[in-house]
Amino acid sequence: MARPMPKALTLTDAAAERVRELMSRSEKPLVGLRVGVKTRGCSGMSYFVEYAEEKKKFEEVVEDKGVTILIDPAATMFLIGSEMDYAEDKFQSGFTFKNPNEKARCGCGESFSV
């Protein structure tokens, strides 16, 4: 019996609420937020989140907790099974990722490697 493929990405309640809040502020119509990875940082890759006005070819669409996240096709293999969260503290706020594919993370937390 084949195992079900893991979801590309799941969201916490806090992340979904922040996505809704960000989308409501946009002056342009959006289909969701796009998540991907870029080559940079001391460990090799870092996450990015941006507004998505339209779905690009081959993007994975994740609908979770009433919001839509589009996953950049180049990032799909790096994000499979990850959880997206949103956290705020006295010093910073932003989306965070619990990624089972990460093998290392730099000391500052800005980049990771798989």
Image (tube, helix red, strand yellow):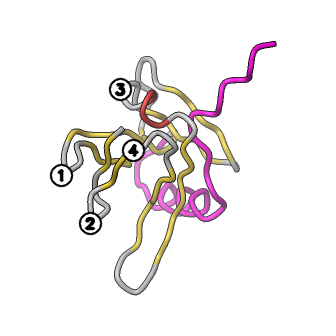
The residues tagged by marks 2 and 4 sit, at their Cα atoms, a distance apart of 15 Å
Would you name the residue on which mark 1 appears? 42
Q: Which residues are magenta?
A: 1-30
Q: Earlier in the sequence, mark 1 or mark 3?
A: 1
State if disc 1 and disc 2 touch (CB < 8 Å): yes
Q: Which residue is mark 2?
A: 108
Alpha carbon separation for disc pair 2 and 1: 9 Å
Q: Which residue is mark 4?
A: 103
Q: Which mark is residue 74?
A: 3
- Image vertical order of residue 5 relative to residue 95, above or below: above
Answer above or below: position of 27 versus 70: below
Q: Nearer the viewer, residue 46 or 48?
A: 46
- Which residue type does callout 3 highlight? Ala
Residue at x 36% of width, y 76% of height: 92
Distance of mark 4 from mark 3, alpha carbons? 18 Å
Q: Position of residue 90 (x, y in %)?
A: 40, 87
- Element under disc 3: loop
Of helix, strand and loop, which one carries label 4? loop
Mark 3 to mark 2: distance in Å?
24 Å
Circle 4 or circle 1, nearest the eye? 4
